[in-house]
Image (spheres, helix red, strand yellow):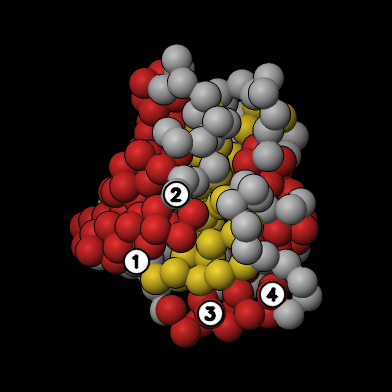
């Protein structure tokens, strides 16, 4: 692995859409670090990519354990000296989530802790490395369910998808995109929220209209944006998504 390549960290990359994002970035010539809570599973995934000639390695990173986040940043700094791409893919759903009247507060708390606060912690830890890049890219994996406008639109097919914890955690993630893009507007770092679509993964219980490979395409596109890249957008496969 050589530092002339762009360096990317993809969280939650040992399976599903995260693994496919890592694969497609590596196929585009990026050296990919696969973040995983279970390092053994992460290494197995990275080895699978490496066996096909792709530049991939694994690192332990648990969004609920800031020690692993700090350690991951230190290891990436030691091995590569910088980070060019951060894909905040890791996230969870919770069986105790549901409409506001029925979801447990424990579920809502777990979802916010992982999907928002964990992502915030990773982003803060990696920002010093992204600042060393000539063209840093941050992609936050969001969802159409994180749109306040769509949640409130009775004509939307997502109107009945009332998951207060999950939807609120992704709305909070979108706020991170908006504020971080504004904070970094005078830097080469570009930040966007990407809703990949309804993808068949463990997260969706195997339901969805898209394969993980298809779902990875839009996040990868935004991870590889060129010098004319717009920042602070919320996009889905059909185009711009309403906040």
Question: In the structure shown, which secondary structural element does the residue marked by tag 3 occupy?
Answer: helix
Q: Which residue is mark 3?
A: 43
Residue receiving disc 4: 50
Residue at image location 45% in from the left, 49% down from the top: 81
- Counting residues from the start of the chain, the first of labels 1 and 4 encountered is 4
Foreground mark, 4 or 2, reads: 2
Q: Nearer the viewer, residue 13 or 79?
A: 79
> Would residue 12 be visible to someone looking at this image?
no
Of mark 2 and mark 3, the one earlier in the sequence is 3
Discs 2/3, front: 2
Mark earlier in primary sequence (4, 2): 4
Work out whether 77 lies above or below 241. Answer: below
The mark nearer the N terminus, 1 or 3, is: 3
Name the quadrant of the N terminus: bottom right
Of the residues tagged 1 and 2, which is closer to the observer?
A: 2
Image coordinates of residue 197 in percent, x first then y, are 67, 49
């Amino acid at each position: 692995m050589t530092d002339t390549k762009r360096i990317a960290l993809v969280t939650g990359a040992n399976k599903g859409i995260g693994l496919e994002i890592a694969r497609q970035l590596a196929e585009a010539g990026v050296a990919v670090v696969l973040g995983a809570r279970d390092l053994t599973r992460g290494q197995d995934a990275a080895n699978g990519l490496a066996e096909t000639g792709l530049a991939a390695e694994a690192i332990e990173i648990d969004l609920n354990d800031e020690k692993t986040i700090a350690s991951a940043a230190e290891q990436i700094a030691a091995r590569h000296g910088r980070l060019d791409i951060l894909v905040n893919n890791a996230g969870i759903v919770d069986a105790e989530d549901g409409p506001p009247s029925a979801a447990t507060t424990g579920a809502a708390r777990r979802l916010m802790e992982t999907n928002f606060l964990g992502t915030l912690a990773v982003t803060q830890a990696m920002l010093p490395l992204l600042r060393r890049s000539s063209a840093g890219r941050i992609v936050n994996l969001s969802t159409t369910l994180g749109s306040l406008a769509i949640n409130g639109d009775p004509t939307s097919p997502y109107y009945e998808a009332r998951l207060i914890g999950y939807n609120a955690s992704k709305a909070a993630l979108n706020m991170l995109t908006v504020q971080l893009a504004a904070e970094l507007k005078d830097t080469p770092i570009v930040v966007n929220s990407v809703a990949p679509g309804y993808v068949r993964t463990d997260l969706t219980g195997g339901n969805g209209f898209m394969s993980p490979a298809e779902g990875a395409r839009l996040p990868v596109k935004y991870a590889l944006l060129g010098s004319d890249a717009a920042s602070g957008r919320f996009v889905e496969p059909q185009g711009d998504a309403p906040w």
